[in-house]
Amino acid sequence: MIRDRGNIKWTSMMLPEHVKELRDWKEEEKRDQMPVLDEQKIEEMNEVICQAMEFHWALRFHYFKNGETNVLAGYVHYIEPLTKELRIIDHKNQKRNVKLLNLVHVELE
């Protein structure tokens, strides 16, 4: 029966920089990739955002940041056309900015 120690036997032969790079690579592999949205999905989100601004509806925003999808609930206060950001007021009356390019999904709350 072979008793293999796995990666432990190779770490003494590797430089610390290589071990660090391998750990970073494993962490990077765990992260999600930003989904690619088609034009129909973008138009659908745009329609929901415009209606929510007009009727002051609360929305739930799913956005991609730092390799993971986050959720933010609140009201659309303003759309900044130059920086392409949404200014959202959450339920604690704090202003949040979310880039339009990072939006994955928008739904009514």
Image: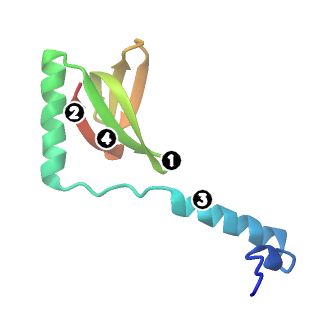
Q: Secondary structure at mark 3?
A: helix
Q: How many circles with numbers are drawn on the protein?
A: 4
CB-based contact (under 8 Å), mark 2 and mark 1: no
CB-based contact (under 8 Å), mark 2 and mark 4: no
Instruction: Please tell me which of labels 2 and 1 falls first in the chain.
Output: 1
Q: Which circle, 4 or 1, is nearer the viewer?
A: 1
Which quarter of the image is occupied by the C terminus?
A: top left
The disc placed on residue 107 is 2
Mark 2 is on which residue type? Glu
Name the residue: 42% across, 13% down.
92
Mark 1 is on which residue type? Asn
Instruction: Please tell me which of labels 4 and 1 falls first in the chain.
Output: 1
Q: Residue at label 1? A: 66
Name the residue: 46% across, 47% down.
68
Q: Secondary structure at mark 1?
A: loop
Q: Residue furthest bottom?
A: 1
Instruction: Please tell me which of labels 3 and 1 falls first in the chain.
Output: 3
Mark 4 is on which residue type? Leu
Mark 3 is on which residue type? Glu
Callout 1: few (<14), some (14-19), or many (20+) C-alpha neighbours within 10 Å?
few
The image quarter in which residue 75 lies: top left
The disc placed on residue 8 is none
Q: Residues under labels 4 and 1: Cα distance?
A: 15 Å
- 40 w.r.t. 74: above or below: below
Q: Nearer the viewer, residue 22 or 94?
A: 22
Q: Residues under labels 3 and 4: Cα distance?
A: 27 Å
Q: Nearer the viewer, residue 78 or 32?
A: 32
Q: Secondary structure at mark 4?
A: helix
Relative side of 11 to 22, left or right: right
The image quarter in which residue 9 lies: bottom right
